[in-house]
Image: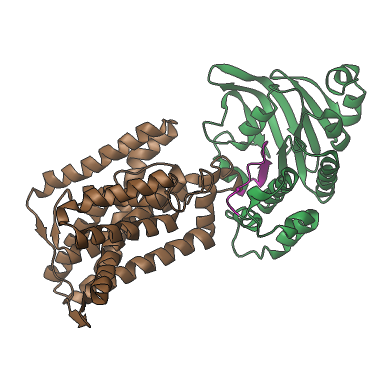
Amino acid sequence: MLATTIQNIINALQWGSFYALIALGYTMVYGVLTLINFAHGDIFMVGAYIAFFVATFILSMLGLPGWIALALTIPLTMILTSAVGVSLERVAYRPLRRKGAHRLYVVITALMCGLILEHANLALLGASRKAFPALITEHVYTIGGVTFTNLKVAVIFTAILSFVILHWIVTKTKVGMAMRAISYDKFAVPLMGIPIDSIIVITFALGSGFAGLAGILFAMSYPVLEPYMGALIGWKAFIAAVVGGIGDIRGAFLGGFLLGAVEIMVVAFFPSTYRDLIAFTVLLVILSLKPTGLFGIAKTTKI
Amino acid sequence: MTLLAVENLVVKYGNIQALHGINFHVNPGEIVTLIGANGAGKTTSLYAITRLPPPEAPRVVSGDILFEGNSILKTPPSTVVKDLKLALVPEGRHIFGNLTVMENLVLATYARDQKIDFSKEYQRIFDLFPRLAERKDQRSESLSGGEQQMLAVGRALMTGCTFLLLDEPSMGLAPVLKYDLFRTLKRLNEEGMTILLIEQNANLALHLAHRGYVLDTGEIVAEGTAEKLLGNPEVKKAYLGG
């Protein structure tokens, strides 16, 4: 019984790690722009594909061993995925912002950007799935009936480390203060000599970079890539961010793990087809009790 | 040499003309005040000078704004603060309520040379406004209106400005706080700060300023030294309650 519980907790943490990493990007962009960047789930997908190409290139063309390939794939993928997120902001969202477009149009644009990313992938790479190369040898450990792999532990550890880094940036650095300041009063930010656009670019770069990191980890854990892999997980991460209190990175992190835990618990007690139904019902109940999310304090204090 | 010169400035919000070709200037080390009723175009003038981005920014149709002789109409707002060392204390304070008092001050140094040791400057702000020192680590939205105004001024000073623009700083302040604030402004000016002050409280403003301009529905209707304006019967009648 104890072993099963611990096993479920480990599974929940690993599964929640993906949601948490993706939810961080949703919540940061929302905090700064009050924009729900619906393309974010697809940026995660792009991240996984970038990781695929980078890793395959390093393994086959350069012939380097797997652990070096991984050490190179992580920063390269994060940088390249950041570039995709920043380009999206530059090409799609900024022109609308310049024209003072209503938020609704920007959200619709974000949805379209996500669909374009999916279908550009489909058109360019075809419908066949890609098998992600094994970068490290998975070791299975069994301690007292609890089974876990080195990869699972690495995923959980990486998610926690990412949160600590982002939390430090948001609370302790001047860039982070500027992000929080924008979320409170956009008007006064340029009066401090801060170019708003540069803060927005940094926000998109950070959010997309960590979606890229989630993409690598996901591809390593479930090594089959397809163009729509970001859609459902993106929606779920968005819901996790809302349940946690969108705009607050602690909320995104907690919401991600909460969703992971609920899903794993449902599967532990019910047929697995019930998973999403019950998981979303639980989240609906949480939201109806606390509509601003777990960390949301009305409208004033975001990020 | 003139520090700031506004020349024949015509400004529109959408189709509404807010300024009808106004002229005024500020010399280094001066306190100049723009007085006038609500809707006279005072805030519009300041927004045009600080180059705030849309939707707040009014559209300059014609005329020019010169800073040390150079047009700043194409200068982005953050550059106005960073390079021209011009800071605005906006109407309604606009402090960052979700940040602490100290974080508000720290954030104001964002665009400055980070090698500078700012601790002396923070200390100076706390000397000017001792209340802020007491509340350093509080979320700034928990401050009273007067304290928020002090923070807004302190924050503007931390940008390293040499030219301070204030939009209705006395609004909503208790009389004691008003006089305190104006004494502080006088002290800053004596230490070399150039000030452009916008006020509805014309009496208070003219007793602080060296020179003033009276703005009425987008036009300058009177100008001169503060004493001259205080003695002007029309100004007295319309703006000084007598």
Direction from residue B58 to residue A68 in the image, left or right: left
| Front position in the image: A13 or B191 | A13
The reply to whether residue A85 is visible in this rendering is: no
Tell me: residue B236, above or below residue B80: above
Residue under the image location 62 percent in, 52 percent down? B108
Residue under the image location 69 percent in, 19 percent down? B218
| Chain painted green | B
The residue lying furthest to the left in this view is A128
| Chain painted brown | A
Q: Which residues are magenta?
A: B82-99
Residue under the image location 43 percent in, 65 percent down? A165
| Front position in the image: A2 or A159 | A2
Q: What's the colour scheme?
A: by chain
Direction from residue A295 to residue A25 in the image, left or right: left
Direction from residue A10 to residue A125 in the image, left or right: left
| Image location (x, y in percent) of residue B44 | 64, 28
- Quadrant of image for the C terminus of chain B: top right
* B88 drawn magenta: yes
- Quadrant of image for the N terminus of chain B: top right
Direction from residue B228 to residue A134 in the image, left or right: left
* B219 drawn magenta: no
| Image location (x, y in percent) of residue A202 | 42, 53
| Front position in the image: B196 or A248 | A248
| Image location (x, y in percent) of residue B82 | 60, 49
| Image location (x, y in percent) of residue B65 | 64, 32
